[in-house]
Amino acid sequence: MEAFRDRRIVVCVTGSIAAYKTCDLVFTLRKADARPVVALSAAAAKLVTAETFRALSGEAVHTDMWGDADHSMPHISLVEDADAVIVAPATANVIAHAALGLAGDLIGALLLCATCPVVVAPAMNVEMWKHPAVQRNVARLREDGITIVDPVSGELACRVQGQGKMAPVETILAATAERL
Ligand SMILES: Cc1cc2nc3c(=O)[nH]c(=O)nc-3n(C[C@H](O)[C@H](O)[C@H](O)COP(=O)(O)O)c2cc1C
């Protein structure tokens, strides 16, 4: 965890039920003396509130591109001094957006602006994960230099068995530490 001391880590949370586990990831970063800042997609904000992440990160949470007094263009300012970006959980949707380079929302746009290492931890239903479109998009992200932390197998929130659970927080952080 020493690797995270004083590091600026942008944590992008997207609309998977696994978003609750990212609360622990953010808190773990904070305990490691990192400086996490959270970007929350609209779908993620339906599952875990911005207020929860604000309390855990100690910083304002960013939910859209249109900024505030401190960040007039958060898609640029959030990542310009970032040491790493973590997308956890990463939905099939954000993976597709990133594979295409779509910048229609804050997370899509900041991923295009980031020059630091990017770590993506997918989480989704097993059939979604196996779908050729998702696998194509994941392969594209790997080609683009993004670290993919594969989902693990087990009982999913939809009560089926298979691969699709977000990797454990420690695994995601270990993969990130390797890229710092
Ligand atoms: C309760 C609930 C759980 C969901 N879990 C997942 C999930 O684990 N993975 C996924 O790819 N999509 C999941 N979705 C669908 C996404 O929320 C949806 O595709 C959304 O548009 C994603 O937007 P975002 O990528 O901007 O967060 C879920 C939807 C609901 C209602």
Image (spheres, grey):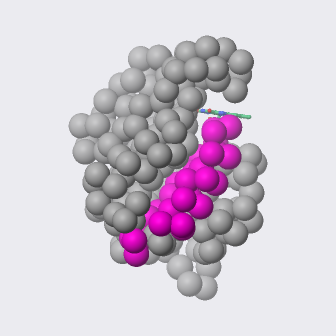
Q: Is residue 60 left or right of residue 52?
A: left
Q: Residue furthest front?
A: 2
Residue 49 point in image, percent of width and height: 74, 57
Residue at the location (49% across, 36% down)?
A: 167
Determine the quadrant in which ligand 1 lies.
Answer: top right
- In the image, 5 versus 45, the foreground residue is 5
In magenta stretch: residue 82: no
Q: Is residue 79 left or right of residue 24?
A: left
- In the image, 171 versus 47, the foreground residue is 171
Q: Quadrant of residue 112?
A: bottom left
Q: Is residue 167 visible?
A: yes
Q: Quadrant of residue 66?
A: bottom right
The quadrant in which the N terminus is found is bottom left
Residue 166 point in image, percent of width and height: 54, 35
Residue 96 point in image, percent of width and height: 45, 36
The quadrant in which the C terminus is found is bottom left
| Residue range (magenta) | 5-32
Q: Is residue 3 above or below residue 164?
A: below
In magenta stretch: residue 18: yes
Q: Residue furthest bottom?
A: 69
Residue at the location (47% across, 17% down)?
A: 130
Q: Is residue 148 left or right of residue 78?
A: left
Residue 111 point in image, percent of width and height: 40, 55
Residue at the location (48% across, 30% down)?
A: 151
Q: Is residue 65 left or right of residue 102?
A: right
Residue at the location (43% across, 22% down)?
A: 133
Q: Is residue 120 above or below residue 134?
A: below
